[in-house]
Image (spheres, helix red, strand yellow):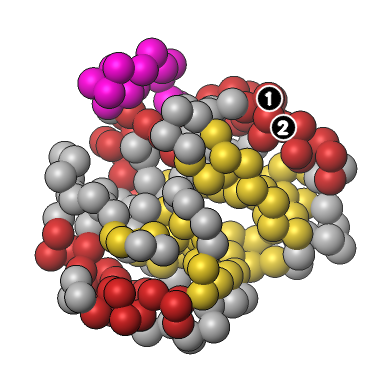
Amino acid sequence: MVIDKVVVGPLQTNCYIVICEETKEAIIIDPGDEAPRVSAVVNYHGANVKCVVATHGHFDHVMAVGELKERYSVPFMAGRQEKDIIKHAKHQALFFGFVASSVPEPDELVDDGQEIDVGTLKLKVINAPGHSPGHIALLLESHLFSGDIVFENGVGRTDFPGGSYDELMKTIRERILSLPANTVVHPGHGGEFMLAEVKSMLSMFI
């Protein structure tokens, strides 16, 4: 597999392009802005985009969804409980002082345990509420695309509409820390890290 990252938008969001080397099929995860830069990476690898997925619907993770969905004629996927958050992403952007377009509704709402096939790759959906009600993570072998659940030096915010500190702690305790220690976490912001590297930090929260 190939995992490439483009840091996009005013909040420096990590957008990931994950490619099956055998088939050249690709998935775009969290395209928060700058669709042309994301497309340039896709073109560099000669990849064929199969779908666009958002770990959650906050504006800094979905603002380029519409343009990429139209450009590649592919479905947009998100967690089943995230539809309303996505609907209001444009208004959230305005609240933070950024002008944004409306985000299209998801074509498919995914559930816990569901697998998204990208060539020979299988990304498993993990329901991970707390930062937002329908937040998901995607597990691909030993790689976790975690959105805004946990970072190298902290955990996600819970003060946005639909956020819950108790739910986030439950997600981290039951869904994240239960993964193997050698899991590589690809967060929504900041650098990648091994799960083993943050276990002691996370114990301070849970």
For the residue carrying disc 1, how many other residues have a C-alpha within 10 Å: few (<14), some (14-19), or many (20+)?
few
Q: Is residue 16 above or below residue 61?
A: below
Q: Position of residue 145 (x, y in %)?
A: 51, 60
Residue 60: in magenta span: no
Q: Label 2 sits on what residue type?
A: Ser
Quadrant location, the C terminus: bottom left
Which residue is pictured at 18% across the width and 41% down the height? 160
Q: Position of residue 189 (x, y in %)?
A: 45, 49
For the residue carrying disc 2, how many other residues have a C-alpha within 10 Å: few (<14), some (14-19), or many (20+)?
some
Quadrant location, the N terminus: bottom right
Labelled pair 2, 1 in contact (Cβ < 8 Å): yes
Q: Quadrant of residue 23?
A: bottom right
Is 4 placed left or right of 84 in the picture? right
Is 151 placed left or right of 206 in the picture? right
Which residue is pictured at 72% across the width and 42% down the height? 49
Q: Which residues are magenta?
A: 90-110
Using the rendered image of the protein, determine whether residue 70 is visible from the camera's viewpoint: yes
- Towards the viewer: 82 or 142: 142
Residue 92: in magenta span: yes
Q: Is residue 77 above or below residue 137?
A: above
Question: Disc count in the image?
Answer: 2
- Residue position for label 2: 39
Q: Label 1 sits on what residue type?
A: Pro
Q: Which mark is residue 36?
A: 1
**Element under label 2?**
helix
- In three-dimensional space, the C-alpha distance between marks 2 and 1, rounded to whole angstroms, equals 5 Å
Is 74 placed left or right of 13 in the picture? right
